[in-house]
Amino acid sequence: MPRPNVSVSCPTCSTVGRPIRKQIPFCSSRCRVLGARVGIVFPEDSARFDAKTERDGACLIFQGDLNHAGYGTFYVGKYGIRAHVFAWVRKNGPVPDGLEVAHSCHRRACVEELHLSTDTHQGNMDQSVQEGRMASGERNAMHSRPEIRARGERTGSAKLTETQVRELRIRFASGGISKAELARQYGISAETARLILARKKWSHVA
């Protein structure tokens, strides 16, 4: 798509030139995400972000991609930013140097502004230890509070949904189709199909 034949001042770097699109007055995708990381949020991105959230009690849970640790990833252009950081900076501006955005609810996918604050990395880690999130074995909050643990399709990297996993298992149990053929139809490897059927993957899905 050609750039519009107008000149604007980029909100992030102040460069005067043709914007990405008429509705997005940044000079580049990089400036668009750099702006988002310091609170220069374009309304279109803010609206997309809000559309990816869902209320769960006092928490507002991000419904987009989740990384391996359970944090939401919101894409601004082609670049990703942690969802809870985006939620904090669009209200408060840049995260102060030496600080990071922390959760008071301990749900990593939560983007409720009232549950977010800034703390030093050490302070955040100390709080995690006090709350049991850094403990080992059964004392770890990942065991005692499974709702904060990202599993299955919530990880953001899953190729299947829980519905597809159940369907795959039912079809195999009904007979007439091999693991290899199921793997081909669902776009996964034969080994992944075998582990799903053996309940060594997606074991939390009934």
Image: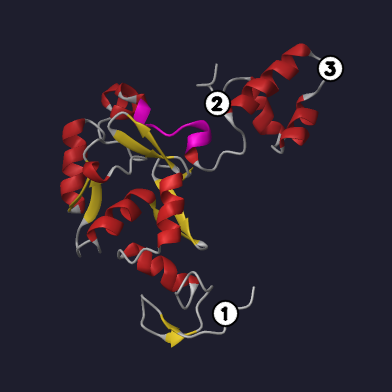
- Position of residue 153 relative to residue 29, above or below, is above
Residue 67 in view (yes/no): no
Q: Residues within 10 Å of mark 2 (few under 14, many from 20)?
A: some
In the foreground, 32 or 184 = 32
Secondary structure beneath label 2: loop
Please state which amino acid type lies under the numbered disc 2: Trp
In percent of width and height, residue 110 lies at 33, 40
Q: Residues within 10 Å of mark 3 (few under 14, many from 20)?
A: few
Query: Judging from the image, what secondary structure is the residue with disc 1 in?
Result: loop
Residue position for label 2: 202
In magenta stretch: residue 4 = no
Residue identified by numbered label 3? 176
Name the residue beneath numbered marker 1.
Answer: 4
- Eye-nearest disc, 1 or 3: 1
| Image location (x, y in percent) of residue 48 | 46, 52
Quadrant for residue 106, please give it: top left
**Which stretch did the figure color magenta?**
147-154
Q: Residue at x 80, y 23 (%)?
A: 178
Crowdedness of circle 1 by 10 Å Cα count: few (<14), some, many (20+)? few
Give the residue type at disc 1.
Answer: Pro
Does residue 162 lie above or below 125 as drawn?
Answer: above
Disc 2 versus disc 1: nearer the observer? 1
Question: Residue 97, which numbered label?
Answer: none
Residue 20 is situated, as x and y percent measured from the top left of the image, at 52, 74
Q: Are marks 2 and 1 in contact (CB under 8 Å)?
A: no
Mark 2 or 1, nearer chain start: 1
> Sequence-wise, which precedes: disc 3 or disc 2?
3
Tell whether 43 sits left or right of 137.
Answer: right
